[in-house]
Image (cartoon, rainbow, N blue to C red):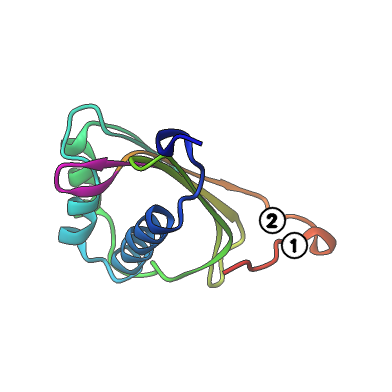
Amino acid sequence: MNDTLAINLPDVHAEVSAAFARYEDALVNNRIEVLDELFWDSEHTVRYGATENLLGIEAIRAFRNARPAQGLQRTLMRTVITTYGRDFATAMTEFRREGGNKHGRQSQTWARMPGGWCVVAAHVSLIDPPPSSTAPRSDR
């Protein structure tokens, strides 16, 4: 198979997994400079949140700088990272915040840019928690 079409090449998957872990650490510890570094510095970057639609890196930066720095800890569940060739990946995860009454879902599209892996599009949504008989299991 041609490497440009290969799914989950081990070295690429490891790179994206490390970038995703770095993002998660920055998110829960409110390391805004790292979050900013990991999002593509472009007017084309999109982040749809649970309560906001952010178009362009400037809107994303403004949101990050204005949000509260407390209550960011969360538990990830059923994280799936898939790489496509050497320069494109998706990261999907579910999450639960301590004491929260909603079930979170996060989708990220990652692309390899000249400076490294960056989120080029993201989406976060909240839904009612699934019934306990179908509660998500932790894969990672």
From the viewer's side, name the closer residue of 99 and 83: 83
Q: Identify residue for label 1.
A: 135
Residue at 69% from the left image edge and 56% from the top image edge: 129
Give residue 67's quadrant in the image.
Answer: bottom left
Determine if the magenta segment contains residue 117: yes
Local crowd size for mark 1, using a 10 Å CA cut-off: few (<14), some (14–19), many (≥20): few
Q: Identify residue for label 2.
A: 129
Quadrant the C terminus occupies: bottom right
Give the CA distance from mark 1 to mark 2: 8 Å
Span highlighted in magenta in the image: 109-118
Cβ–Cβ under 8 Å for marks 1 and 2: yes
From the viewer's side, name the closer residue of 117 and 64: 117
Kind of residue sitting beneath label 2:
Pro
Question: Is 14 left or right of 128, judged from the image as shown?
Answer: left
Kind of residue sitting beneath label 1:
Ala
Please indicate, yes or no, whether residue 23 appears anywhere in the rendered image.
yes
Residue at 51% from the left image edge and 36% from the top image edge: 1
By secondary structure, the bulk of the magenta-drawn segment is best described as strand
Helix, strand or loop under label 2: loop
Residue at 74% from the left image edge and 55% from the top image edge: 130
Q: Nearer the viewer, mark 1 or mark 2?
A: 1
Determine if the magenta segment contains residue 2: no
Mark closer to the chain start, 1 or 2: 2
Question: Is 90 left or right of 128, judged from the image as shown?
Answer: left
Q: Position of residue 38 (x, y in %)?
A: 24, 52
Please indicate, yes or no, whether residue 108 appears anywhere in the rendered image.
no
Q: Position of residue 62 (x, y in %)?
A: 18, 44
Helix, strand or loop under label 1: loop
Q: Position of residue 11 (x, y in %)?
A: 39, 58
Residue at 46% from the left image edge and 51% from the top image edge: 9
- Label disc, if present, on residue 122 of the rendered structure: none
The correct choice, above or below, for 69 with respect to 37 in the image is below
